[in-house]
Image (spheres, rainbow, N blue to C red):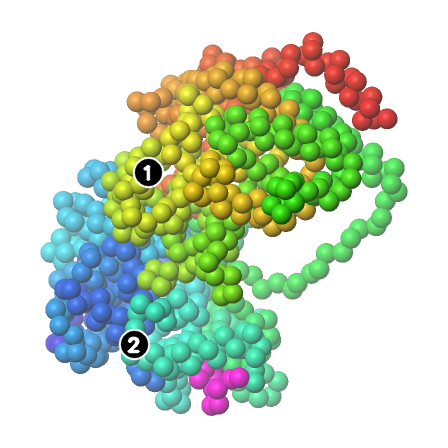
Amino acid sequence: MNSAIKKTVFHSWHKSHGAHMVNFGGWEMPLNYGHGIVEEHLATRKFGGLFDISHMGRFSITGEGALPFLQYVLTNNAAALETGQAQYTILANEGGGAIDDAYLYRMEEDEFFLVVNASNTAKDWNWIQEHLGKFSQVTLEDRTEIISMVAFQGPKTKAILEDILKKSRSFLPDPGRNHLRTARMEGVDVSISRTGYTGEPLGFELFIPAENALRVWEKICLASQEEGILPIGLGARDTLRLEAGLPLYGHELGLDQDGKEIPVLSIPPAKVAVSFSGVKGDFIGKNSLWKQFQELKNREEVHTSSLFQPLAVPRRVWPLAILSAGVVRPPSPVYLDEAVVGYVTSGTMVPYWKFTGEGLSSVIAKESGRKAIALAYLDAAIEEDQTVKILSRGKFLAARVVKRQLSSEAPPFARPIDVEEIVVAKPGPKKPLATSVSDIVQKAIKNTRWRQKQTVNLIPSEQTASPLVKLLSISDPCGRYAEHRHYDYLEDAEIFYYQGTAFIEEMEARLREEMARFLGCTAVEIRIISGQMANAAFFSAYLDYLNRFDRKSEPRRLRKVMNHQLGRGGHLSSQPMGALRDFIGVDPQMDKRGVIPFPVLDENPYQVDLGQTEKLLRQHKPELIILGKSMILYREPLTELRRMVDALPEKTLIMYDMAHVLGLIGPSFQQPFLEGADIVTGSTHKTFFGTQRGIIGSNFDETSDYHEIWEAVERRSFPGSVSNHHLGTLLGLLLAAYEMNAFADEYPKQTIANAKAFAQCLKSCGLQVEGDPQIGYTETHQVLLRVGYGRGPEIARRLEDNNIIVNYQALPDDEGFTASSGLRTGVQEMTRFGMKEEDFGELAGIMADIILRSRSAKEEVIRFRSRFTRMEYCLPEEKARPLIEELLKVVMG
């Protein structure tokens, strides 16, 4: 490799725009521009920054042998990468130290791209070449000067790239770090990844053919010039990475100040960069890294007696918040009491933006501040929240050991984390009972009047139960017990463990019958008290069934499950972070829990891509498919999935979590069991008229080959999930089931008609409605609006101020709930209060005025709602009133 000073294709641009150029890693690069490092740092955090990072080394590794080669020379599990994904990784030596840290991108099945540090490019190239001979069918190519690399980081970068890509009808990578996609920019194919070295929640890195890179750079600059975005040099890149707690080779990785190897796992990010997956096999440094891993694990578990001697990780890298006035620089020593416990590896004064307000109402302010921070390599015994002191320029500065200095979890902004003293709240003075009772009753009256008489409720996951359903829910047997279980050896009897249960036994039998009628199945479990519990009970039952031949070994978990990704509307309870967590295993190839998200259409991310789904089913062979969404505009492709699953040699169950659409079952929407569902779960208080409970339904009765699964469902419901199954709300649910069956055709039909009319009128009023206009934007009770990136919470609050209740919603291209672009609305509750298509058209006009023109309409909304306070789709008021009065007398004594 040439040792002469190198220049990127942007060199002339940098100089012509006032850059202060320096030699870095053998490249002449901009340290900063005329604005200075502080302004560049602040611009990146508030607006965005454009970085030339073409000095970093870029190696292409291709061929059938590329994957096994990378598994050997890198610490992470390259097999876990799907095409279009990236991962942080380490080039380790046999002693468990770092040759370098790097980023690996999987461009195609057998095509990978490895990005390494500029100062280590030649060393890394030679080291990789040394091991290449052990593998066949691998081609290694240095593409550092063929492919340019640009980072575009910060809150406004996404909108700018989206606007540029509109011309070519290209798309950004999916939300979430480490996704990668090729797009067309300025007539050039550009690989765009959601990666970066700044800690920004919105960050992209672009790989551009060098001959076209300047054109793309200048296009981004032109599109950014009115947005406060600046070109950023290496100086601010360093302060940004330090604030984010990211390591720099030669400081936090490599050799320490005594010339000893810094163990890879001494840096926190290495936790995600090292894999011991069984599919990875042997790799360089594995034994040493395994010792480091086990030692850190034992420390966490406080098994200090089993630590290796000498320590495999004698020190760890920690962020330090400097409490005293002053700045620390490496290698300033760090003391605990009078003993030296480490040294500063990186340190500086960083600027930061202040925020005003709290929670989702907080906004970035005009004021900025500065604070001294550092990273330090500290003895293994040092822990978070300890106070240490740093000897800097002849005086001691106090510092707090912290977990991090910056939060990236609330896009679009990265937020500084202040060091605060922990204050434990204590209860206030005890009030007299009468005072407390009066207070809560008056507030309940006010809230009930407001929600039931003065507001238009459009939350799609809520429903008002009829007065009789509410009253039955607080009547006896509310608060009673009726535990029961089926026993084969007692003449197939259902045994109740309490007396006085004859009434509830009859009511449960009726409820099972009514729910089976409504669902169109033969077996229903009705003791579950929430939709999430219904899912957990079924997952547990399915595992019980899968482990039925071996009750002595540790039960295995589900190997793979296909479901809707949370960010695309999937139910929380169907995610590894929800009810599925304890029932899904870690897939050794994926190196994470074996969940396969449904692929979606680029042009309509609310719809499943069936062609890609069929490929994934054949590839992964999931044991369970979970349908159902909380952001649901379309019918689920049950019939198509049934056909695909039946063609597989392995048994795959199809579960449909109908929590949001349970009340829409029928010819107007979907008939799940006729279309191919094996299991239906759901909550009973969204589109269904009931109390807040859950159900599980199936056709796994005594005549089914899978009756053992249903027996497990019953066991995992009781005693597995509930003891007291809330008999009052169960009684209320029975009446709700009668109501649903009485209006099983009319209510779903009117609800869906209302949703379509609402969507079309909102669109006519100038609002952006999600979904396919060819079908009226929706096939369910839900209507989704796009109101601007990150503006969902603000618009939802504005509507609430005007007595219209919706919920803000992260749309499929949003990075999280704090960046919500959408509003999720549902027409089901107001349909039940008598609203028809023309009424939703009128409401759409009011909402458009509030959203687009900030018009105050609270009194108008109150008047509007006053026309819709009488509940429909239930027993008529003249027939219900005598029963209500009679029941009230009994309930109230």
Q: Amino acid at mark 2?
A: Asp
- Using the image, tell me which numbered label, if any, was put on residue 727: none
Residue 687 is a magenta residue: no
| Region in magenta | 306-316
Residue at the image point whose x is 71% and y is 27% from the top: 472
Which element carries disc 2, helix, strand or loop? loop
Q: Nearer the viewer, residue 549 or 476?
A: 549
* Figure check: 797 above or below 64: above
Q: Quadrant of residue 125?
A: bottom left
- Residue on which the image places disc 1: 641
Residue at the image point whose x is 59% and y is 15% from the top: 872
Which element carries disc 1, helix, strand or loop? helix
- Residue on which the image places disc 2: 282
Q: Amino acid at mark 1?
A: Leu
Counting residues from the start of the chain, the first of labels 2 and 1 encountered is 2
Tell me residue 91's x, y (percent).
29, 75
* Figure check: 694 above or below 146: above
Does the rendering let one see residue 315?
Answer: yes
